[in-house]
Image (cartoon, grey):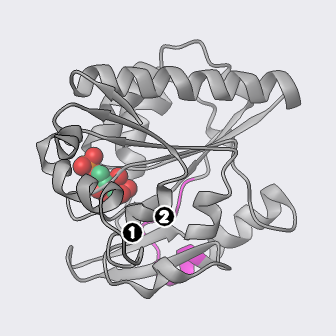
Amino acid sequence: MRVFPGPEEAARGCALEIAGRLKEAVRERGRASLAVSGGSTPAMMFAELAGMGVDWSVVDLFWVDERAVGPEDQESNYGMTRRCLIDPAGIPSENVHRMMGEWDAVEAASAYSEELRAYFGGGMPRFDVVACGMGDDGHTASLFPGDGLVEDRRGLCAGVWVEAKKQWRITLLPAVLVNAGWLCVLACGAGKAAAMRRVWREEGPAVDVPARLLRGGEWFVDEAAAAFQL
Ligand code: 6PG
């Protein structure tokens, strides 16, 4: 876990590491794949990442999750990513693999699973980088506390009704998240401290605190979120 003074520093630190990992993958294989999350924290990180010299012509961009809304909706993770990363970085449209939020969520998830199979070939998809966040309630991706999908170890992507948000979502499933070449979690603000404590100081099933699935990742947090350590 890397603790930074504030959210800006944590976002920059996370962006620097993502940029480095993507450049390394491009050096090794000539191409790289990145799956990103939504929410407010990633927006800050994307703005930093856009200007870090990644060759986006050979990076394929996917999503960890999406709200079941159209791309123009203010809730759209794709829309936020387009504003904060895709447009500023000039990521070619053919490299952008968005989840079809405007479709029926279950159908969109099925189509995304097929897209992942086509891109990665057989077996479990392995993104070079998966970038997750964590909600104040300990959710990650669109895997919320109490959702049986948190225990799923075979599926790739699912459409899910999130009662807490009164919203359909499309989300990658745990096996894809933890199969990442490099998995990172960016969590900032005092609102995250309670969930951080439940992830790092309490034992219990991941279904209670889905971000527990990501303990093997590298965490970038600010001092406010890390207050659980005091
Ligand atoms: C989403 C995200 C979600 C997010 C966390 C953190 O679609 O909401 O993918 O998992 O990463 O809720 O969001 P904040 O950064 O806004 O706290």
What is the quadrant of the C terminus in the image? top left
Spot occupied by residue 166 in the image (x, y as percentages of width and height)? 21, 79
Q: Can residue 44 be seen in this view?
A: yes
Q: Residue furthest left?
A: 190
Under tag 1, what secondary structure?
helix
Residues shaded magenta: 98-109
Instruction: Choose top left, top right, bottom left or bottom right for residue 82.
Output: top left
Which x, y percent locates residue 140? 38, 61
Q: Write down the residue under mark 2.
A: 213
Name the image quarter holding residue 225.
top left
Q: Residue furthest bottom?
A: 148
Disc 2 secondary structure class: helix
Q: How crowded is mark 1: few (under 14 residues within 10 Å), some or many (20 or more)?
A: many
Alpha-carbon span between mark 2 and mark 1: 6 Å
In reply to whether residue 17 is colored magenta, the answer given is no
Residue 81: x and y in percent read 41, 40
Rendered-image quadrant of the N terminus: top left
| Along the line of sight, the residue nearer the viewer: 162 or 137 | 137
Mark 1: amino acid: Pro
Left or right placement of residue 152 versus residue 73 in this view: right
**Residue 98's spot in the image, x, y percent?**
54, 54
- Badge 2 density bin: few <14, some 14–19, many ≥20, Cα 10 Å: many
Asked if residue 127 lies left or right of residue 220, the reply is: right
Mark identifier at residue 210 = 1
